[in-house]
Image: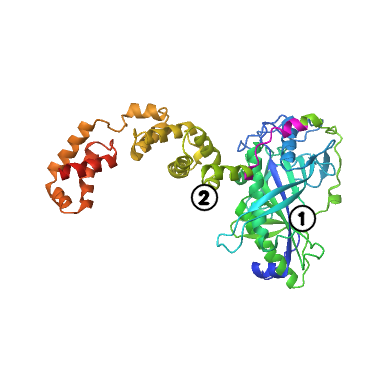
Amino acid sequence: MSAELTTELVPYDEAVARFDPVLGLEVHVELSTATKMFSGAPTEFGAEPNTQVDPVSLGLPGALPVLNAAALESAIRIGLALNCSIARSCRFARKNYFYPDMPKNFQTSQYDEPIAYDGYLDVEVPASEDGTREAFTYRVQIERAHMEEDTGKSLHVGGSTGRIHGAEYSLVDYNRAGIPLIEIVTKPLTGTGDRAPDVARAYVAALRDLLRALDVSDVKMEQGSLRCDVNLSLRPTPDSPLGTRSETKNVNSLRSVERAVRYEVSRHAGLLDAGHKVVQETRHWHEDTGLTTSGREKSDAEDYRYFPEPDLVPIVPDPAWVEELRATLPEPPAQRRRRLTTEWGFSELEMRDVLNAGLLDPVEATVAAGASPASARKWWTGELSRRAKAEGTDPASLPITPLQVSELQALVEAGTLTDRLAREALDGVLAGEGSPSEVVAARGLAVVSDETALVAAVDAAIAANPGVVEKIRGGKAQAAGALIGAVMKEMQGKVDAARVRELVVERVGS
């Protein structure tokens, strides 16, 4: 571990006024394959420690790797979606340094021959919330996207920090060892100025959306299936040589990516102002404090002693197959959002609410099932989101389909259900009692359509409340609410309140 220099942080705005920040982002993506990168061991998240292993992932003598075909296909599709060139031929290499949680003590990765290279991703950086900074599009240049395997996981027990220093003992879980990874590495991101944190966050968010659309990963940052390493350096001017970089490892939320960039800008500026040199090192991000601390001095490529993996043959993708995979790419997420915003007539704020809740897919499916965009958005971002929050899940995981949501809305629009009755019908659907129509029939929830019974209930309420009637006739129209409430109670809410109001006004005046 390198010695930690303690200097006073420079306020962020002051730091970016005097220094030019340069970013480099490395995003590790766990692929959602059923088996590991080089073996048939399963990949279930959250399984009991050391149950998702086999001789290959345990590094046992004589166990030989075999490349996962599904992982290769996902890697190529990711490269194509990032506008990369796909290698005509590439190979794996062994990356050597001490891995306490990698039994064979090296990582099988790609070094000088990645599967995909020289791409880009256009990122829409939103305007600042205070309106002082405008939205803009930034092109992130992609250096490479290469295949590798994940390492295992160490658990340090007995210390106060959860790290090895001060721990009484350590445990190792090899379940994650060998999980297929794609590492996506950007070229230096220059010209971001004071928007560097915003660019970093927007890029990771755009990449997450793209990977989700490709259906190659669940991209759950909180579970580590999408992790970002934030490289940052400062230089005096945009024309100066690049400064020494630090690498903040395994940042696992969009907010933390932004915060890590801000903190490192302030820390670097403090070191430079104090006359110190920035150490090329890895650093740990602390979510609770918003700080980084020193990890180890960062090795250069030659320190890893890369050499070609002798147990795996070179990969030579058939160009015709690559073009077939290109044809499977979905509509780019940013393009899709713009199209749907226009088609649905949503404001930017309305679409942002849908996107922030991760509900674009169910809303689109509900519209396709026949609901209006406004009603689909209302159901998913309103009642369904409220219920999901109460159950500690996400709305899309609730036991209701977009078709059923559309059917529920159709019953409201047909006058079969009031909003309150629709919520009762929703209870039944979520409880597994059937479709909305089946629940309405079984529970007897349909609005009473017998006008004779409704008129009788209105007349009974009028007769029972002469004082209220006098107030209405005296010009106090708001007093009608008491009669309407009495009728709704009598009819168990199974009538249209607007029609009740009409009848009250009509009967009181007669």
Mark number, residue 347: 2
Residue 263 placement (x, y as % from top left): 66, 62
Q: In the picture provided, is 212 more to the left or to the right than 358?
A: right
Residue 338 placement (x, y as % from top left): 59, 45
> The C terminus lies in which quarter of the figure?
top left
Q: Which amino acid type corresponds to the residue marked 2 in the rendered image?
A: Ser
358 to 10, vertically: above or below: above
Residue 430 placement (x, y as % from top left): 43, 33
Q: How is colour applied across the structure in the image?
A: rainbow
How packed mark 1 is, by other alpha carbons closer than 10 Å (few <14, some 14-19, many 20 or more), is some
Residue 78 placement (x, y as % from top left): 72, 39
**Residue farthest toward the bottom in the current orientation of the protein:** 274
Q: Looking at the image, can residue 59 be seen?
A: yes
Viewer-side residue, 111 vs 201: 201
Q: Looking at the image, can residue 105 be seen?
A: no
> Residue at the spot x=55%, y=62% of the render?
130
Mark number, residue 485: none
> The N terminus lies in which quarter of the figure?
bottom right
Query: Does the magenta segment cover residue 330?
Result: yes
Specify start and end residues of the magenta stretch as a single range: 322-334
Mark number, residue 188: 1
Viewer-side residue, 475 vs 132: 475
> Residue at the spot x=23%, y=44% of the render?
484
Point out the tag, 2 or 1, that comes first from the N-terminus. 1
Q: Closer to the camera: disc 2 or disc 1? A: 2
Viewer-side residue, 249 vs 136: 136
Q: Which amino acid type corresponds to the residue marked 1 in the rendered image?
A: Pro
Residues tagged 2 and 1 counted as in contact (Cβ below 8 A): no
> Residue at the spot x=19%, y=37% of the render?
457
Query: Does the magenta segment cover residue 116?
Result: no
How packed mark 2 is, by other alpha carbons closer than 10 Å (few <14, some 14-19, many 20 or more), is few
Q: In the picture provided, is 262 more to the left or to the right than 187?
A: left
